Image (cartoon, coloured by chain):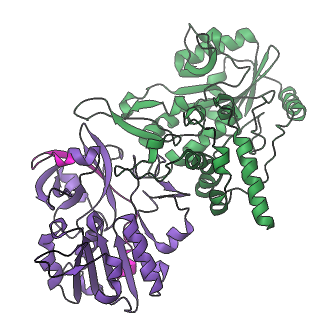
Amino acid sequence: MKKDKMKPNKAEIIEVIQETGSNLNVKTYRVKFIDEDVRNSFSFRPGQFMMVTVFGKGEAPFGFASSPTQEYVELSIKETGRVTSAMHNLAEGDIIGIRGPYGNGFPVERAEGKNLVFIGGGIGIAPLRSLINYVLDESKRDQFGNVQMLHAFRSPEDALFKYDHAMWENSPDTVVKYTIDNPCDDWEHCVGFPHTLLASELDCELPDALFFTCGPPIMIKFITEELKKMGIEKKNIITTLEMRMSCGFGKCGRCNIGHYYVCKDGPVFTFEQLNEMPSEY
Amino acid sequence: MSIKTANNKEFEEFLKKLSREYLLYAPVLNEKDDKVVFEPINEDNISKITLGCQADVPLKECILPYNEKLSIEENPDKKIVILGARACDIEAVRVIDDVFLDEPVDPYYQDRRDKTIIIGYSCAKMEPTCFCDTVGIDPVEHDSAQAYLYKEGEKYFLKVMDEELESLFTSLPGGNEEELAELIDNRRNGMADSNFEIDLPVPVPEAAAFAASCWEKIAEKCLGCGVCTYYCPTCYCFGFFWQDKDGEDKWRAWDSCMFSLYTKHASGHNPRNSKDKRYRQRVMHKFSYHPENYGKLACVGCGRCIKRCPVHLDIRSALKLVENELKEEGGK
């Protein structure tokens, strides 16, 4: 990386994937650094994040949606504010800025040899996908135990990463479940909020399991309450937070929760850690 | 270490020499708004250097400009001398150093800091809003300046702590070490305490102080104007902005945790969505979070936030209320 950590490296959008229908606009961008040295030296861990610049519009933090085992960096963006809307106006061939990676990432070493459960909701699945695709990568798969996933979307047309589903489902020792909020025609999977399905659809009693969850705050709240009821220890429930940020590495001062900075002490925290922190997120 | 002395005329010649060879900042009385601010010194304003009172605006602007284009090439080539920094402001530079020189280092800040020489100025009295002694600072002298200036009547003393800087002061005659030691002793003995005592551990216990119910009462009249953060010598928070349409040139500017937009997410969610939460953040950052992360308080007791607050919020009263509430809780 350049010495100048506050300025982005230029990256070309090489593919734009429209993930969802118009009601919940999510696109995934596959990008490639222009500078060859940056391209070759850039590495990150699942769960870290990058600061993305839309030139002339602004900069915002986004988790990596891709695994470091994949050829290209991918980011999935839901159209929400100024930067994300500007991002949605970009197309293949356009140039964005990327700096990073920042943050601690998921505890990959701790997950080795363990059974893993992923519970994601909406755009919250994007950061989980970084670890899911890492764990399910052929070169890594035997380092991890059983994998279970529950992906929650509002409706079938809001499903993300459909092109990954076959790979996920066909991975050894892997169970994949999908749920939507309300019943609808031609839907063969689960219906209902994910916390109501944990007991019936997943085996949460597997020994030595780690639970990774990300989604809307209200979903995370109910998931953790449900898991705690099942006797899952708080240190084994892991999530990743978002926060408004400028710098991404502990200088600009805005993403703190108590004395922790989400940018450098997080964004990944266990619920044991979150319980110790002031509830200001 | 060496001691130099000067009379008014010798001191002025010394300043002129400094201002030619260095980018010299010193507190200057700006007559337009009757404020003392650190400004670059030249032939025109050298006579307006004002050392006798606390500068209204702290010196942080000399090392962390209120806005700057992110480019080391834009930084001054010359070495920077900041003259007239009081102990509170010198300690504040150390607080900002904690953050900006911590890995990963902020290259723009580091470049300016590497070029900066600080000449401290010994306080002779506490102002009513001062409480540096409460936060463990000696207003007479701070040992992280490279040199220190003492003025008594018409006489100046300079103590050069950094031997590499001796050449800067060769034009000045040598001073009497004992005479200066006596002056320092007299100041330390003669200066009245700030009369503000606080009985809270450092760092202030995060969970208990965060959960205190008094914040709402404390911040009731806060206007959220952010003036406390702009005048604060340790407030360093910033945001980025772009002035050109294509967004190539990146700038940064001071930002303030007192503003509601500071933490507002694109989704509309705001973790600090009320003024009591924002005021709590400012106080807790100084007395709990920064000490927890860096081992020292991030309030230097300069009292500028008290002087400048349009609704007379007083950080000392806020701390007292927190102290009382924690004691009551502890006593239960």
B225 over A265 or under it: above or below: above
Give the image location of residue B91, x and y in percent: 66, 40
**Image: magenta residue range:** A87-115
Give the image location of residue A30, x and y in percent: 15, 58
For this view, does B151 lie left or right of residue B92? right
Give the image location of residue B41, x and y in percent: 56, 16
Q: Nearer the viewer, residue B159 or B244?
A: B244
Name the colour assigned to chain B in the rendering: green
Q: Nearer the viewer, residue A184 or B111?
A: A184
B177 over B269 or under it: above or below: above
Quadrant containing the N terminus of chain B in the rendered view: top right
Residue A83, by quadrant, is: top left
Verify whether residue B82 appears in magenta. Answer: no
Name the colour assigned to chain A in the rendering: purple
Work out whether residue B45 can be spotted: yes
Residue plotted at (31% across, 75% down): A193
